[in-house]
Amino acid sequence: MTSWAKLSLSAGPAICKTMIIKCPHCGKETEYRDNPFRPFCSERCKLVDLGGWLSGTYRVPIKNSNEDEDGEPIPQKDPAKG
């Protein structure tokens, strides 16, 4: 299981498994089931995260065609040398 999720077992007539996750924004532990903001703990955390994507704070990196898998420039061949 990952570090952001854990199962909590509560004793009683029936054993109930509840998945507890950590909010990706603030780290607060919250119940996954019946949480309308999941994986976030609240609407605030959800909107702050969305704002990060919309403002460009969060970005998915792209690979340029002149870079290898590690992001290093690919040496260009000199067309005059053949």
Image (tube, grey):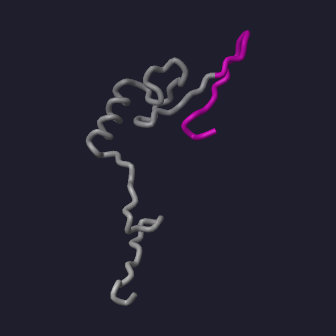
Q: Quadrant of residue 20?
A: top right
Q: Closer to the camera, 29 or 53?
A: 53
- Please say if 64 is above or below 57: below
Name the residue located 38 percent from the left edge and 64 percent from the top edge. 65
Judge left or right: residue 52 versus residue 21.
left
Name the residue located 35 percent from the left edge and 84 percent from the top edge. 78
Q: Position of residue 72 (x, y in %)?
A: 41, 70
Q: Position of residue 11 (x, y in %)?
A: 70, 16
> For the N terminus, which image quadrant?
top right
- Please say if 39 is above or below 72: above
Name the residue located 35 percent from the left edge and 48 percent from the top edge. 59
Q: Closer to the camera, 49 or 18?
A: 49
Judge left or right: residue 43 versus residue 68.
left
Q: Closer to the camera, 58 or 68?
A: 68
- Please say if 70 is above or below 30: below
| Magenta stretch contains residue 49 | no
Residue farthest top in this picture = 13
Q: Closer to the camera, 34 or 11?
A: 34
Range shown magenta: 1-17
> For the C terminus, which image quadrant?
bottom left
